[in-house]
Amino acid sequence: MSQIDAVRLNFSPESLIALNFVLAFVLFGVALDLRLEDFRRLASAPKAAIIGLAAQFVLLPAAAYALGVLLRPAPSIALGMILVASCPGGNISNFLTNHARGNTALSVTVTACSTLGALVMTPFNTAFWGGLNPATRLLLQDFTIDPLEVLGSIAVLLLIPAALGIAVAWRWPAFAARARRPFRIVSMLVFAIFVLGALAANWDFFLQHVHRVVLVVALLNGSGLALGYWAARAARLPEADRRAIAIEVGIQNSGLGLVLVFNFFAGLGGMAVTVAWWGIWHIVSGLALAAHWRRRPPAQVPAS
């Protein structure tokens, strides 16, 4: 066992329950922005959303597998990369897309569809790509991961709060319109406070081990942003769509990833620190990229 795996994060069962509630709270707030029309757009103009979902659920997990094989980090770190790459889009992707002058409607559509798609694709990709690498395959066997059990947990974590948020927005649209922005801000603050609290409780552990995941997380996150952008560019989508898809692929739901690490992998150190650091790093990189793009309106970027 790698040294990093011998350490367990200071994360009690009560903290895991709290994280489940925080994640549900955040997803409910995101779902207040969703409409049934967001899903209907797939039928009327599916190209951009399909490109985004393909990059999210095919290209990014494949990149995580390839980086694990090329860089050969500890098996638990490699599996953590695959797990976080298999999660749906993160809860701040819509905000970042809007700030980057991207296509916010497309971002919302891809977020909604990836959240539902994660019910199947997250356990499938974790099992499939994790099983291809002999080192990570041994970990999957050690923890005897049942994709159907993972699917059930994701259904509870994602489907119920998302469905409630969509139902509230449909039944009380005026309330949802007033509550949408403050709820999003409050939910992100609650999540940030939880992450900072967990970081403070495990500060010594992070100082000792985070250097082992900084490079691989930065490379995987950069790969996600680049793959999303260039897949959209190859499909000749407009610049605003390229930005939306890049951010959707590069911003992952690390909160869900942490829940899965503690529910199904006993808080394995390498996986936990990889997913936790992703949760910090993707906000830094996403904000930096959005700030850069905000200074360059899409109309000024020539299509090619």
Image (cartoon, helix red, strand yellow):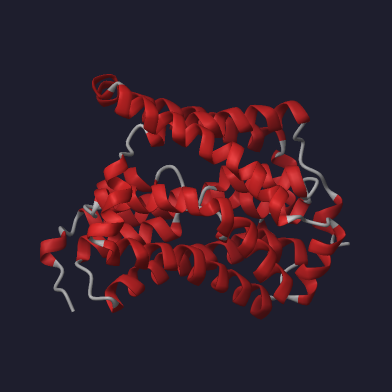
Q: Position of residue 8 (x, y in %)?
A: 81, 44
Residue sitting farthest toward the left: 299
Q: Position of residue 93 (x, y in %)?
A: 38, 48
Q: Quadrant of the C terminus?
A: bottom left
Examine the rendering and report whether any part of residue 207 can be seen: no
- Residue 23: x and y in percent read 55, 34
Location of residue 61 by image quarter: bottom right
- Camera-nearest residue between 121 and 263: 121
Residue 54 in sight in this render: yes
Q: Above or below — where is 272 with respect to 301?
A: above
Say if 21 sits above or below 35 in the image: above
State the quadrant of the N terminus.
Answer: bottom right
* Relative to 233, 228 lies left or right: right
Q: Position of residue 32 (x, y in %)?
A: 35, 31
Residue 234, compared with residue 168, is above or below; it is: below
Would you say 195 lies left or right of 111 here?
right
Instruction: Please tell me which residue is depicted at 78% across the width and 69% down the height of the picture.
Output: 137
Left or right for 161, reference 290: right
Q: Residue at x 27, y 44 (%)?
A: 37
State the residue in front, 38 or 4: 38
The residue that appears at 37% across and 57% down in the rendered structure is 247
The count of marks equals: 0
**Residue occupying image coordinates x 30% and y 57%:** 42
